[in-house]
Image (cartoon, rainbow, N blue to C red):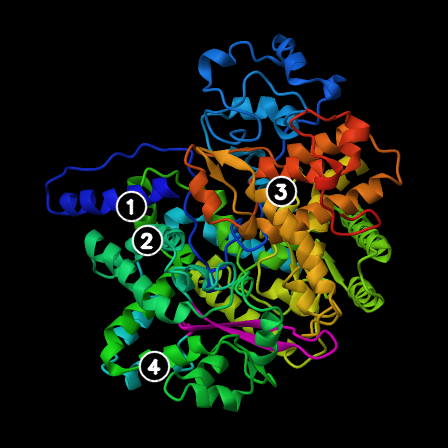
Amino acid sequence: MTDIKNRIAALVISLTLAASGTLSGCGSRKTNEPAADSSAAESESAADTSSAESESAADTSSAEESTASNESSEAAKTTESESGTDSAADTLKTGSPWETTVESGCLPYPKPALSDDLYAYYNYDFLKEHQDEYFSASDEHIGEVSTAVVGVLNDTSKKGHDIEQMRIFYNQALDIAGRKGKGNAEIQTYLDKIDGAGSIKEFTEVLTAEDFPFCPFLTGNIAVTDTRGKNMVELKPNLLIVDPIFVGGEYYSKLDSDESQEMLETLADDAAIGLVPDLRGIGMDYGEAYYAVMDLAEFEKDYGRYVDYDGKYLNEDYGNEAAAISNGSYTDEELYKLSPDFPIKEFIKKIGKDGSEKYYIGDKNWLTTLNGVWKDENLDKLKLMAKAKILDETRLFRDPTDYFDMLELCEMTLPTAQEYAFAACDSLNTFSHTLCKIYVEDCLGQKAVDRLTDLTNNIVSAYKKLISETDWLSEDSRAAMTEKLDNMTLNVLQPVNGYMDYSGLELVPTDKGGTLFGNYLLLKQYRQEQEKKMIGKSAENSSVWYSVPPTADTVFYKASNNSISVMPGFVTSLFYTDDMSDTDLMSGIGFYIGHEICHAFDYEGSQFDAYGQPNAVFSGDDLDKFNEKTLRLSEYYSTIQITNGKHLDGQNLVREAAADISSMQALLEMAGEQDTDYDKFFGHFANTWAEVLPADYAELVATDNHPLNNVRVNVCVQMFEELYEKLGVKEGDNMYLAPAERIRLWGKSTS
């Protein structure tokens, strides 16, 4: 990200000079950096891997089956040639086990023994191969979903209404050459209407008119806050710089933090890659466009800072998050009173979300702040924001010439026509549900659905067993936690209520005058109509699939409807193939699923009951006992040095670290009931987290509440007897942790 930020800053200067004739041009060297993807409607990214719970996975070849599990570091030195590391001393800056394992250029040499650094032992060849790049083995699987789906689309023997509608749209998106040179012709009439507004009253009339198909200041999705109740609507401001779903107001709300300010600036710079050419298309030069984006970020943060985000209430009193959810819903009349100037009523109707008994908005201050800026004195800024958001939403469906030029000037790789067309289909406003249905049914197959569903159920059962055996829990807490597990909805590769129905959709083929942009508007309207039918119906516990694209590279837990979602976009061959062993399945994707299930019982998730209601599952002093255990875990993580004398911040990491430990405990509970090869189990587990970070990776650690991959692997396995009994780690080894220092949250032998 820092590299992109520096490029953008330098680019503004060079392009301004170029525009004045001082420079004759800029280079067009391509790099391996992925092309910046534009945001489709509502900033929905096809594969956002930075969301709250989208931890980056990694893979290498299967775990080594060496008998060297019991080797000490000295023994490892005698086997350098066998591990292929003889030349490493001449090319690598040597590091130390644990401390620098993930740092580029600092691979430990020679290869550590398993007993000193399990993560490096199982991943050594991968780490050595990628020492000069920022890379995780999951990167080797990027594009698998799109390649598989495009293969089905190109197979014309595959028939059916939905796939044929998607083919129309995909093929229109594929015709990049046919759109080049057309500029903003199809969208210009809407931009002109905005420009023509001379007052806030006229501006409001433009945006709320029936024939104006955009709502640049408000977004809404189907939501559930009581699984025994009805579907309702969640409303958020339609943010430009940050994604309101995946990021929310986190960086806007923490601007007193240097790390958050830097991250926000980076996000703004990333957004500028798409927005600068958009704004040039409406008459700005490069410099004007760039600084306009920065000004819009400043303007947006005033209301964006109040939008909900994952972890918002972590440092507040227990129960505050549940209370905020409970108190964050309003009737339409109550919303109108909060927002007499900002046209909330008309915008709700515009996005097809009218008719809900209540609307969840979270912190009302984002709405009252928007209401406060809805004035004539801010008209120019509001008009620019509206145009920028519409241009951002429609970027993939217009002439891409300026956008491609910007990518080249930034020395970024241009997307292929296939990648571009797939991205156009991969939005909740277009075909993300259809393409995931194709991927699951035609590519992964029913066997994948069955095996992963069985795995998830088995992990839930392992948690129930652990909870039943946890001696520090009261009977009331145990009963509430068990009830929560019994009623947890498992959306594995598909929403339990099914994918969106496109049977009523009819797009216009190119030979009948249809265009990509025109069909995008039809698709957007169709989605709104389909979701409107859901409002007020019995609660759909897969409602989150209507706000997060199922192509998202993530597995996550949702407390407000007590559900686990394993998104199809996450399930590449890294995590599933039909011939993958049960052991690899369990220690790979099973770890992620078990991790997410634990979030039902952490500081945040435990505030909600089995039905998403604000009733804590911990009774009496059980919360204090739970916090004592997580405090010990936090203190242990804070002792771990990562680089240059820096230590991890255990308090920042403890929620995710506790989920890691709990997941491993549940998996080992399952492994103990099977004929498990623990070398393969721990090896594959380590393989899925292999990665190399840049030399300044300590900066990334400061803004991430997840442990470093090497640390999360090593600490997880340290806590359990299997490391010592099955792999022979003993006192004096670097991986050894004394029994009294091992921390487990659940089960008979908790400490």
Residue marked by disc 3: 148
Q: Nearer the viewer, mark 4 or mark 2?
A: 4
Residue 550 among magenta residues? no
Q: Amino acid at mark 1?
A: Ile
Left or right side of 233 for 721: right
Q: Where are the magenta residues, as a range? A: 213-238
Q: Is residue 78 above or below residue 747?
A: above
- Of labels 1 and 2, earlier in sequence is 1
Q: Nearer the viewer, residue 645 or 717?
A: 645
Q: Is residue 397 above or below residue 136?
A: below
Left or right side of 744 for 77: left
Q: Amino acid at mark 3?
A: Ala
What is the quadrant of residue 84 in the picture?
A: top right
Q: Residue at x 22, y 52 (%)?
A: 286
Q: Residue at x 77, y 26 (%)?
A: 727
Structural crowding at the residue carrying mark 2, measured as other residues with C-alpha within 10 Å and reported as few (<14), some (14–19) or many (≥20): many
| Alpha carbon separation for disc pair 1 and 2 | 8 Å
